[in-house]
Image (tube, rainbow, N blue to C red):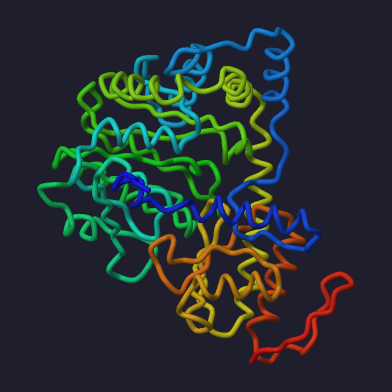
Amino acid sequence: MSLSLIGKGISESVTLKLNETAAILRAKGDPVIHLGGGEPKSKVPIDAIVATAALLNSGEVRYTPADGIPALKQAVIRYTDEYYNRVVGPENVIASGGAKQAIMVALQAILNPQEEVIFPAPYWVSYPEMAKLCGAIPVPVKPEDGTFYPRLQDIEQVVGSYTKAVIINSPNNPSGAMYSEQFIADIVAFCEKRDLYLIMDDIYHRLIFDGRKRINCWDFAKDKTETSKLIIINGVSKQYAMTGFRIGWAVANKKLIEVMTNIQSHQTSGPSGLLQRAAVGAINGIQSSVESLRTTLENNRNVLVAHLNSFDGVHVTKPDGTFYLFADFSSYDKDSTRLANFLLEKVQVVTVPGVEFGMEGYLRISYCGSIKDVTEGVERMKWALDPNSPNELYIGDRKLVRDWS
């Protein structure tokens, strides 16, 4: 079969594949615990549901403008003013089918084949594949000090004549690390100086812990005109637990938004009008659900960290935000894919191999499910990995026996 070079070079999304695996196991009746997902289990805000129902009841679910309905653009403008202290116009906003599409369309609008996109490691699994889909080169950068917190010099030393853009995701998926204000200030200034696009993936920016304050990249931008190459990405999936609604957005200079809109118009004709109305309801509605989710996640994080600290040989960096923890399990197995498969086979716990995020020997563990899933899942993992564990473990009525050393 003849396939394109790009098509043959793109791998599937491991996180979406794991969601599928967990769903299949559950459908078979297996007591699987999914600690690999990125999907909050809290209820969708009632304002989003009401807005959706109102449009459904009207029966008028039609095509929308390719860059989003006016009501959603106005909601994003209001959001940008409130959280970024930045007043933008409708021509500076595009709504997309999730933050993922907003990033993808932005990359398609700015990248030429063989140009480079830089992002710190560990990184979201889709960044390298998105760059490849544009014929561009992904350039992950591991912090030289071995932490999850990059420094400007880590980025500087890989920037070359082919570098076109930098992607910063803070708080970070998979580590939960929130980059310092100094780093954000430095990277904004550096990208302006070097005339690079800076894509700020802020999808988790309200899900932060321990009294931390949100960091606004616009505070450090000197160029606030229509020549700015700063692109802000956000959406409703994480903060409002609206993952299935697939609405995200980008805020950038109007020329770039125009090009992104042209591209998107040929891809999807624009996001669903029904789901855009839901996003308007969430953004303009009562915001208590976001704080409730944030508080629950912080508590879950604390429980998960305490349980993992009881493992011998597991190195844990306490997340500053998101709902992920990225732990070093290399003392048990340096091959994270083999380790994740082992845990799934032996105790039916789903985790995500660290190699998919650019760092081998780690596992990404999600704590956005119930506290029961978090505690029981980690207890199963410890039983499977700790040679001093009892020989038997009961999962419901099912007895598991350790037949490995």
Q: Residue furthest right?
A: 397
- As drawn, 185 above or below 347: above
Is residue 11 or residue 119 the one in the foreground? 11
In the image, 148: left or right of 158? Answer: right
- As drawn, 363 above or below 211: below
Q: Residue furthest left?
A: 161
**In what quadrant of the picture does the C terminus appear?**
bottom right
Residue 159 in the image, given as x and y percentages of width and height:
16, 52
Is residue 343 or residue 78 the one in the foreground? 343
Is residue 31 among what the camera can see?
yes
In the image, 68: left or right of 405? Answer: left
Residue 45 in the image, given as x and y percentages of width and height:
69, 31
Is residue 131 among what the camera can see?
no
- As drawn, 377 above or below 85: below
Residue 202 in the image, given as x and y percentages of width and height:
44, 40
Q: Residue at x 73, y 63 (%)?
A: 32
Place residue 287 in its image quadrant.
top right
Q: Residue at x 68, y 71 (%)?
A: 378
Q: Residue at x 73, y 67 (%)?
A: 375
